[in-house]
């Protein structure tokens, strides 16, 4: 065996004990929230057939799929001719011969595949959550990894807007639960849940753009509103070849205040809807945007039925677009206002999840948390609970072989009481054992020197405060338990 | 997009909600046990560099590694010449040009890589557990998958036999905790933890085989002892070219009774050790097997210090070999006696975990649970707890839009009490809603018809017993909580 300096592939990460514990803390809160709302766990394989994955994420997505080499003689169907023809399509020609499988790219396509494969036995509406890693052969950079987790919850088989309202509730519950650890207001995640409806968005597009073939161009520009303002949006639309015939409507539609103060989300819905009706030349026609506004108002009504208290965190934003084109109804996004970070969660309703697999008409709504970003937010705000990083609570010091034997029943009793404990595995200098406890984030060290042994007591040292107590074993258990 | 009938790669599995919940039940018990014993979680990437993986699992292992195609123009270094030369080595020649990364094959090599990469910051002894999937391009068959989980716990940086004793304790704790769900003795996992030491095994080899170059051949035959008996072993050794000069010792060494009754494990250690000494021509020399026996006896002593009660489950078996050649000290294996299944757990001590990565002298000991096999055992014994399969505890029936609105605060209150609940998302026939609850394994349905509404009460139906109660909301919460 040759000796080598080992490394890990770029864009991947090892998670050491402290980080795993903190990640699991976040996963646990998300999982418990999903389950409390009736979502059940699903896990799909890491390996999917490329026939399932290809063509679902656009051309760029196909490029970013990790493909797995066929096992055995993977070259058996590849010919020299396949390579020689340098028309730039060699990889495309050879790929199907080399690789049949790829790595999961998101959790939505595997979910759709699962629904189609199991449609005979599933009970609809089917509410599932899925917390698993995905892989993308993207260029790694700060905050962008080639292997990262997604946490998705989706319900398919119902159009009920109760689902949309509950997504808002789940988003709040996860963030509010994380905020419970805050020791001051400054430590809290200050969040805004932005909500919109694709039809409201289309209403703006229809009002402002005469050229209806350039929808995605329009939304790309609109997405910059925060950065360049309404006038900047108009200017850039013009540069991209939109005529300014409808531009005056944009000024009205993008208003966020009533002249005196910021409109509430529900005031803005009423206002935007009034604008949509104004824009229509035919006063009897239902503007496209109004359907969206009506559904959004219904979501707000359902939330009021839940006695929802956090409307100040929920913002109707008629310009919210969300990149993915398969959304057809309500769309969501969470922005953390006191940390400089992209959205930590997003989602929306889609009409046709499973069409590509031959099962049309399955509509649903779902959302996803970005755990890496949430982790970074919590770290920046110092919002992780103190205990989240450690596992062992108590280290028993090991003086010599005889003392070690005497401490075995003590160790057993601590563990029997559910206290994660360990005995330093060999006699060693105390300084070394304390260093071990410290390095591992262990809160307590338990010692029994000759004095304590004679009295059948123990010294319990709290490493965070430095305080020492002399206690009996039941008192130790009570203190640590 | 072309329409296709989707499928998953052979050897992989989807885990639906009921199965995930049951698997998580097992993972949870293993995880809590590891943590109680001071093991901290580690997670390594799915993708590893092939330079890290190759050469670590033998030639067969290298074949079974899943390799991931380089992204971008993966053909750029492949020439037509690479293919044309049909000397049977084309794949070996082309592979390094096509693929730099592979999928994790086990958890031990990534652990060793992690230890080497982080040796400057880790505090030793380093105790880590790791519960993650691994991938092998093996021929799929019943019980053998291409993607499956391993649950490993290892401690490196200490020779203390306390670690070996604690492995026995952890094995018992996991199985005893699973057994707590048993409603009768028949449902319990009847298990035997087999323990041996590589030196005791080598003692047998040295006693019985004159040709010391054929160690692995010898162990392959010895491994069949249960099936073919002592005489069968001798016969097959002969067929494989071993001389029968040492064979008479085998008869003694493989004895499990003292003529009247089965020896206890500790009696057998004394007996085997006496045999080893007998075999040695020089009465002053320490036989190779004795060092192993001495360590095993020390492990038993430490267990006695823990007041270990289950020596009847712990069997010294001097013929236990464990396939993996890197073990150098104690070795372990768990056999479930009342289910027809291979070992559900195994492990051992190794001298040189990280040598291949340039860090010699790191010794450690570890073990692993096979969750798929444990799952099958629990299923066969019907030992899963009833609640393990369901997530939602209560479904609120949905009669019509008005009633739906009235039930929103009820739903909120149930969830606020920590009860996983859902409201059927749209008005529907009761039969359909009950079918939904049934299909999802939901225990209770909560209804409020006009009568109950008038009295501000609810009907709570237990779907398992069919019983209905009329209750106030606080009573409902108390019943479900």
Image (cartoon, coloured by chain):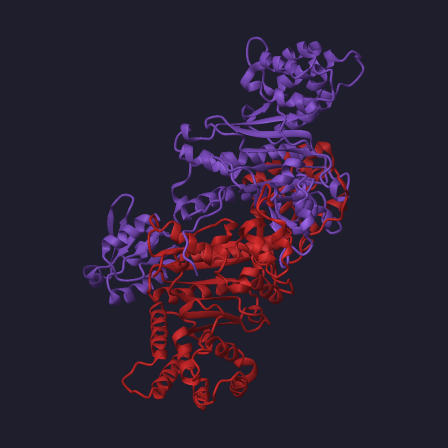
Chain colours: A purple, B red
In the image, residue B293 sits, relative to residue B401, either above or below, namely below
Q: Quadrant of the N terminus of chain A?
A: bottom left
Q: Is residue A43 visible?
A: no
**In-image side of A49 versus B240 (left or right):** right
Q: Nearer the viewer, residue A178 or B127?
A: B127
In the image, residue A164 sits, relative to residue B84, either above or below, namely above
Q: Residue at x 20, y 63 (%)?
A: A454
Q: Is residue A5 visible?
A: yes
The location of residue A390, given as percent across then percent down, is 38, 48
The location of residue B154, given as percent across then percent down, is 42, 59
Q: Nearer the viewer, residue B334 or B481?
A: B334
Q: Nearer the viewer, residue B409 or B213?
A: B213
**In-image side of B172 versus B103 (left or right):** left
* Quadrant of the rendered image containing residue A56: top right
Residue sitting at the far left: A451
* Quadrant of the rendered image containing residue B212: bottom left
The location of residue B302, given as percent across then percent down, is 34, 69
């Amino acid at each position: 065996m040759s000796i080598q300096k080992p490394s890990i592939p770029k864009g991947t990460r090892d998670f050491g004990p402290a980080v795993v514990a903190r990640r699991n803390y976040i996963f646990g809160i998300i999982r418990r929230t999903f389950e409390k709302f009736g979502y059940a766990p699903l896990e799909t394989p890491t390996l999917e057939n490329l026939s399932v994955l290809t063509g679902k994420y656009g051309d760029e997505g196909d490029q970013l799929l990790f493909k797995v080499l066929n096992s055995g003689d993977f070259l058996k169907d590849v010919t020299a001719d396949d390579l020689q023809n340098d028309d730039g399509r060699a990889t495309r020609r050879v790929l199907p011969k080399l690789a049949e499988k790829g790595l999961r790219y998101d959790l939505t396509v595997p979910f759709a595949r699962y629904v189609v494969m199991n449609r005979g036995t599933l009970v609809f509406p089917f509410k599932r959550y899925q917390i698993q890693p995905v892989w993308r052969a993207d260029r790694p950079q700060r905050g962008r990894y080639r292997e990262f987790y997604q946490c998705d919850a989706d319900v398919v088989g119902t159009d009920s807007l109760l689902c949309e309202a509950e997504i808002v509730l789940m988003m709040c519950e996860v963030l509010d639960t994380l905020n419970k650890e805050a020791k001051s207001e400054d430590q809290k995640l200050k969040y805004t849940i932005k909500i919109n409806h694709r039809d409201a968005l289309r209403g703006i597009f229809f009002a402002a753009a005469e050229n209806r073939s350039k929808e995605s161009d329009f939304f790309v520009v609109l997405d910059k509103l925060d950065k360049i303002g309404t006038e900047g949006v108009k200017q850039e639309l013009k540069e991209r070849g939109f005529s300014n015939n409808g531009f005056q409507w944009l000024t009205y539609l993008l208003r966020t205040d009533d002249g005196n103060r910021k409109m509430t989300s529900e005031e803005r819905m009423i206002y935007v809807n009034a604008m949509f009706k104004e824009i229509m030349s035919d006063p009897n026609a239902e503007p496209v945007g109004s359907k969206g506004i009506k559904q959004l108002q219904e979501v707000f009504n359902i939330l009021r039925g839940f006695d929802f208290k956090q409307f100040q965190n929920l913002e109707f934003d008629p310009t919210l677009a969300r990149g993915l084109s398969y959304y057809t109804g309500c769309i969501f996004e969470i922005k953390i206002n006191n940390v400089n970070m992209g959205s930590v969660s997003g989602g929306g309703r889609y009409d046709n999840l499973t069409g590509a697999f031959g099962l049309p008409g399955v509509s649903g709504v779902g959302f996803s948390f970005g755990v890496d970003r949430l982790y970074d937010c919590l770290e920046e705000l110092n919002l992780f609970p103190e205990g989240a990083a450690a596992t062992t609570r108590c280290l028993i010091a090991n003086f010599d072989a005889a003392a070690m034997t005497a401490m075995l029943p003590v160790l057993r009793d601590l563990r029997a009481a559910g206290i994660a404990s360990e005995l330093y595995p060999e006699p060693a200098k105390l300084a070394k054992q304390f260093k071990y406890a410290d390095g591992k984030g262990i809160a307590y060290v338990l010692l029994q020197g000759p004095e304590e042994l004679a009295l059948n007591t123990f010294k319990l040292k709290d490493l965070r405060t430095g305080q020492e107590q002399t206690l009996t074993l039941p008192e130790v258990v009570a203190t640590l338990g």
